Image (spheres, helix red, strand yellow):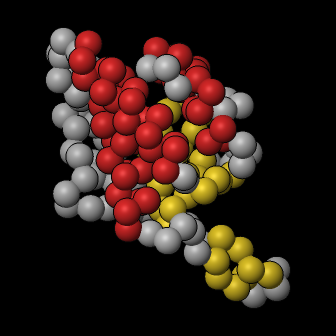
Amino acid sequence: MGYCFMIMPYRVVWDADNEEMVPDFETIERPDAPDLPNSHHGRSSVHAISYGALDAWAERVGLMDLLAHDGELLQGGHPGWVMLRPEHLMRVQQALSAAQARATLPAGNGKGYDWDLARLVWLEWWMRYGLATWEQPILRNI
């Protein structure tokens, strides 16, 4: 079990069955998004991570307060969603810069790759894209 993070625009649609407006979520794929070696996520705005792996990774990269189980970006609940803000991106960019400075392996998954770095590359790219492209970018976790 774990989280499935999705970065996407916020939209609402009418749910006729329940007669209410509900968030409409979609997976986004971009040909210019990072396609990291051995990652099963491809160039999509979706990234899965187990509960334990999230906490361990967030601690290693210095983003516990942002991404751990009770971190700021998960305050929308699980499942849930939160609006992305420029300060979230700045924190991730700082963590990415620090990880790149100490990296001895290229970003990717598996032997010979740095998966911590790969997750930061994915998160930074999609946060930056979302904030630059969509009026209301969100991080959804399911």
Residue 97 seen: yes
The residue at the point 62 percent across, 42 percent down is 73
The residue at the point 43 percent across, 59 percent down is 131
84 horizontally vs 128: left or right: right
Instruction: Indicate whether 85 appears above or below 26.
Output: above
User: Percent from the top left, x then y, of residue 138?
Assistant: 55, 58
Quadrant of the rendered image containing residue 30: bottom left
Q: Nearer the viewer, residue 116 or 92?
A: 92
78 horizontally vs 48: left or right: right
105 horizontally vs 43: left or right: left
User: Percent from the top left, x then y, of residue 50?
Assistant: 54, 29
83 horizontally vs 132: left or right: right
- Screen quadrant of the N terminus: top right
The residue at the point 19 percent across, 57 percent down is 32
Q: Nearer the viewer, residue 104 or 85?
A: 85
Instruction: Indicate whether 8 appears above or below 5.
Output: below
Q: Nearer the viewer, residue 86 or 62?
A: 86
